[in-house]
Image (cartoon, rainbow, N blue to C red):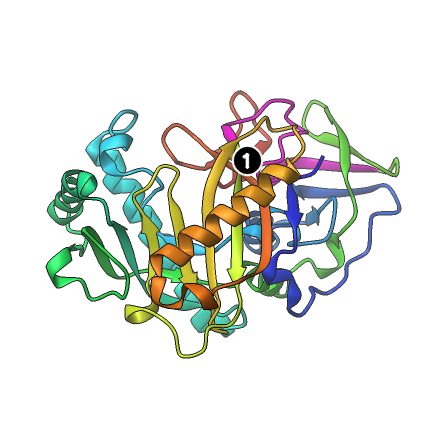
Amino acid sequence: MEYVMGTPYFCKVDKLKQYPYIDKDTKCDVLIIGGGIMGSIANYHISSLYDTICIDSGILGHGCTSCSTALLEYNLDDDAKKLKESLSDEDIVKIYKIGQMGLNKLHDFINANGNKCEYAVKDVLMYSNNTKDNASIEDEYEFLRSHGFGAILIKDRDNPYNFEISRGILIPNGGAEVNPYLLTKQLFELSKNQNNIYENTKVVKIEKLKNSYICTTNLGYNITAKKVVLSTGFNFELIGTPLCATATTYTIVTNKLKDFGWNNDALVQDWANPYHYMRLLPDKRIIFGGEDTERKFDAPIDQKLATKKYDTLLKTLQKIFPSIANEIKAEYTFCGAFGSTKNNVGYIGRAKDNLYYFYSMGA
């Protein structure tokens, strides 16, 4: 089943070390299925403690990871008002603080191991140029401010950006950016199980035994594991049913825009529905994504719809920056599977009623 389509910008850089496929029956304490960013994080940590095998059905980092825009923020996709439909204020604040902890851990990882993934700390801006959104943005600002998150309210008269803003929330140093493909590469190359990482190895069947699992690959070999961690992103084939609402998200990457940028090159998200998000890449291209559409988790990507969405993204971006609209072109276009749970929180932890089966999936 197709979960990405197009020419992902991030895969144009140095390729990951090539890993073999499994060609014999084998055993391990922990089997991690999935070699994207979530799988590489799980593998990095778990392989330091247990005999671990990590496999991917394709090439490491070439699935949904390659289609990520990699805007790393502690806040979730929905605002606090929407989140309160399924979470308490206390839970929302706790999740935001866990997000901050994650950003801090990434910062510590880079400091300890070097910056090989274009990592940078960035301001975060959420904004709207529609006065109808002013009240909801001010409500979100009050929530953040009242719970100690360093938010600044921006109004049209004090807008420091080179695009139109009616209301905005600025969180100084509230996020980070990376090249997700290179971060995946770095994590795998630093992991403790270099001889137990495999590409082009797809699990087609999982059989539960009393205290272990037998996972059969597409070539007919068996991996016997005491525990299994699913890090398959938004590919739910092994589960048989989606764990969350699934969608396709669309992205364009522009041509190089010499001497262009905006205030501190913040990570930017608008208040539209569906929303858009953008950041400036190190080589002065804008990566701009959004226009999400619903899809069944096992449905193919609609190429005709994708082409239409790329055109919409380009025109929207040109409207945001009218002074250089004629200069902005879309040099890379790609789309991929995306999912979101009701409370915006990913699936990380033990599967329900299953002692040895775990999920490590973003959402």
The kind of residue tagged 1 is Tyr
Residue under label 1, please give it: 359
Q: Residue furthest front?
A: 326
| Residue 225, magenta (yes or no) | yes
User: Where does residue 24 sit, x and y in percent of width and height?
Assistant: 88, 44
Residue name at image x 58 percent, y 46 percent = 335
Does residue 191 appear in the picture of this structure?
Answer: no
The N terminus lies in quadrant:
top right
Of residues 106 and 340, which is closer to you in this image?
Answer: 340
Residue name at image x 58 percent, y 36 percent = 234
In the image, residue 328 sits, relative to residue 275, either above or below, namely: below
Of residues 211 and 3, which is closer to you in this image?
Answer: 3
Of residues 18 and 172, which is closer to you in this image?
Answer: 172
**Callout 1 secondary element:** strand
Give the total number of marks visible in the rendering.
1
User: Where does residue 75 sit, x and y in percent of width and height?
Assistant: 31, 46
Residue name at image x 69 percent, y 38 percent = 2
Horizontally, residue 135 falls left or right of residue 313, namely: left
Image: magenta residue range? 222-246
Horizontally, residue 146 falls left or right of residue 361, namely: left
The answer to which image quadrant residue 136 occupies is top left
User: Where does residue 181 sit, x and y in percent of width and height?
Assistant: 59, 60
Residue name at image x 45 percent, y 37 percent = 346
Does residue 205 appear in the picture of this structure?
Answer: yes
Q: Residue furthest bottom?
A: 259
Horizontally, residue 75 falls left or right of residue 136, namely: right
In the image, residue 265 sits, relative to residue 200, either above or below, namely: below
Mark 1: give few (<14), some (14-19) or many (20+) Cα within 10 Å. Answer: many
| Residue 245, magenta (yes or no) | yes
User: Where does residue 341 sit, x and y in percent of width and height?
Assistant: 43, 30
Of residues 156 and 93, which is closer to you in this image?
Answer: 156
Horizontally, residue 167 falls left or right of residue 288, namely: left
